[in-house]
Structures are given as structure tokens and as C-alpha cells.
Image (cartoon, rainbow, N blue to C red):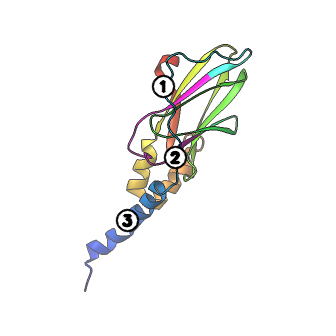
Amino acid sequence: MLLSRASVSILPLAVSLLLISALLFGCVTDQSTPVAAVVAPAPIPRGQAGVTVTRLDGFYGTLVAADIAVNGSKIASLDKGAAYTGSVPPGPVTLTASCACDLGHYTIHFNAQAGKRYAFEVSPRNEQYAATVFGGLVGYAVDAAANGETGGMFKIVPAPESR
């Protein structure tokens, strides 16, 4: 017998982990240069609200860009350490972080006020990583299905100074 019973029972888990790794780390990213930090933010256009989204460091998802959308329209693809600054119309805003190679997404909602600035941080969502490591493809799929608007590879939250 070439394989023991213990190695046969571990084999599906090992294959699942290799497949997940290939899927998550094999994604193509936007190779543009990260946006440099701005010392003084640009003025907010009249009748608009300012929005800044900064991608934090983290191991999980390090090789893929975080796609950022406002009210369903993609505004940026952020690599590690990159930031986006722009404006949004006042009123209800839906801000989403996702990845082109992922099943899920993370969405937050806020009510923008004209003339006010809002800052957000995007970071890896470690819960998905844990579900994938411990559950393989099944854990990955269950995490995506169970978390709805708070799933995906990345999470987006208000920056500490804007909370």
C-alpha cells in the first residue's frame, strides 16, 4: 500500500488548500503606481462631500488590488498602501470593497453631507482567510454565502479619525 489511511484523509484538504491558494494569489492586479500621500487635501467641490479610501497593509490578499465602488460605480483599484481621494454627491452613499477574483464583497452605507470629509480604511478580512484555511473550498463558499454584504477578501471601515 503506497498511502496510509491518515495520508489519504488529509489529501483532499491539501488539494483544496492548494487550489484556493492558486485562485487567490493568481489574480491579476492593476500594476499602476500607488497614489502618493497628499499633505494638504484638495478642496471639496461645491455641493459635494470629500471621500478618502486608504488600503492598509496585510498578508492576506497582498497580491491583488482592492476594487472600490461608490453607489455601484468602480472608482479605484487600490494596491497595498495606496489611497484614493475624490468627491461624492450628498445623500445616501454605498461604499463597496471587493476583488475581481473573489465571490464576496464588503459594503458600508453612510449619509454624506456637502462640505464634509469622510475617510475609510480597506484591509484584508481575516475571517475569510480562516474559513478558507480550515474549510477549503467549502469554507470559502460558505463564508461568501453566509456574510452577504460583509463578506469578501477585504473589509472597509471608517478611519479612526472619522468615527
Q: Is residue 112 above or below residue 29?
A: above
* Circle 1 or circle 3, nearest the eye: 1
At x 50%, y 45%, the residue is 153
Residue 49, percent across and down? 67, 19
Answer few, some or many: residues within 10 Å of disc 3's Cα (few below 14, many 20 plus, some between 14 and 19).
Answer: some
Q: Amino acid at mark 3?
A: Leu
At x 46%, y 47%, the residue is 128
Q: Amino acid at mark 2?
A: Gln
Q: CA distance from mark 1 to mark 2?
A: 18 Å
Q: Is residue 145 above or below residue 18?
A: above
**Labelled pair 1, 2 in contact (Cβ < 8 Å):** no
Residue 132, percent across and down? 43, 54
Image: magenta residue range: 51-67
- Mark found first going from the N terminus, 1 or 3: 3
Please identify the residue farthest to the bottom as the structure is shown: 1
The residue under label 2 is 31
User: Can residue 136 be seen here?
Assistant: no
The residue under label 3 is 13
Q: Amino acid at mark 1?
A: Ala
Q: CA distance from mark 2 to mark 3?
A: 33 Å
Q: Is residue 33 left or right of residue 107?
A: left
The residue under label 1 is 37
Instruction: Give the quarter of the figure containing the N terminus.
Output: bottom left
